[in-house]
Amino acid sequence: MESGKIENPKKSSIGLSEKHGKKIVVKKILVASGKGKSSKASSSCSKGLAIGFFLTACHMSEVREMELIKYPNPILSQKCAEVEVGASGVSEILDEMSKKLYEWEGAGLAAPQVGILKRIVVIDIREEPPHLYKLINPKITRKSEEMVESNEGCLSLPILREMVFRHASVTVEYLDENFKEKQIEATGFLSCCLQHELDHLDGVLYIDRLSKFKRSRAIKEFYKLQEEKPEDGGE
């Protein structure tokens, strides 16, 4: 998610830069990234995911460079399992995800975006005072009735942006990297960012919150934008 402040309290801006890392190899995990486009996307992703698998037990002591999982890889539609309290290797996963969050110039990153189907999220919305949130098994326990319009994007859907509605404020309970219980009372950009990232843990992308018509239009626009993107990855 792009760093930035909310200029209008009724509109927040969530996005993720299209800069990428290279590879992820986590102990007992082999992650595949779908690279298909248009009509070839489905078959390409199926082949990619065939060699990808997720953590059923959280023995994650060896972490190497992570690779970004992009739409339409079906791993992004999978629901993540909770992390067992006290599981080994979780702090290493959080640290590596945090490094990638800054490398990819994001405001938030969820574990399935790097091929790990566990309920893990890192967030830093670049506001003062700076704060890096490392969340294990986060869950929303309160949602405001008031809704805000949020201009969102996602690292896993490079370049594309769409307007979605989010709750203006939320309360999120989670475990920190030491498995201590914590709580966040969030409003504005942080609230939208939390909702965006926690959606990932349930296999929900922000485009899934659009109407059927708008979602279909957004997907067509996404493929069009990928075709128009410079080969060297430039802006």
Image (cartoon, rainbow, N blue to C red):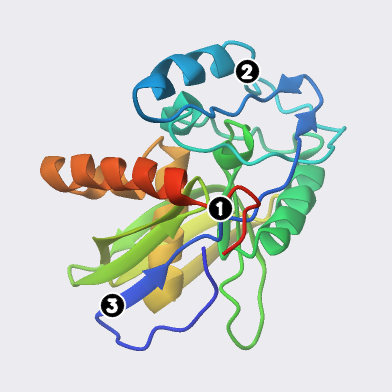
- Residue 174 in which image quadrant: bottom right
- Disc 2: CA contacts within 10 A as few (<14), some (14-19) or many (>=20): some
Q: CA distance from mark 1 to mark 2?
A: 31 Å
Q: Amino acid at mark 2?
A: Phe
Return the x and y of residue 8 as percentages of the image width and height: 30, 87
Question: Could you tell me how far apart the alpha carbons at marks 3 and 2 are, in whole angstroms?
Answer: 37 Å
Q: Is residue 91 left or right of residue 211?
A: right
For label 3, count other residues whose C-alpha is less than 10 Å away and answer few (under 14), some (14-19) or many (20+): many
Q: Are marks 3 and 2 in contact (CB under 8 Å)?
A: no
At x 64%, y 19%, the residue is 56
- Residue 15: x %, y % from top left: 46, 63
Q: Amino acid at mark 1?
A: Pro
Q: Which mark is residue 53?
A: 2
Residue named by callout 3? 11
Viewer-nearest residue: 142 or 66: 66
From the viewer's perspective, is residue 146 above or below residue 41? below
Q: Quadrant of the C terminus?
A: bottom right
Q: In the image, is 224 to the left or to the right of 228?
A: left
Give 86 or 76, whichever is nearer the viewer. 76
Looking at the image, residue 68 lies above or below residue 74? below
Q: Earlier in the sequence, mark 3 or mark 1?
A: 3
Q: Would residue 120 be visible to someone looking at this image?
A: yes
How many marks can you see? 3
Q: Which residue is mark 1?
A: 230
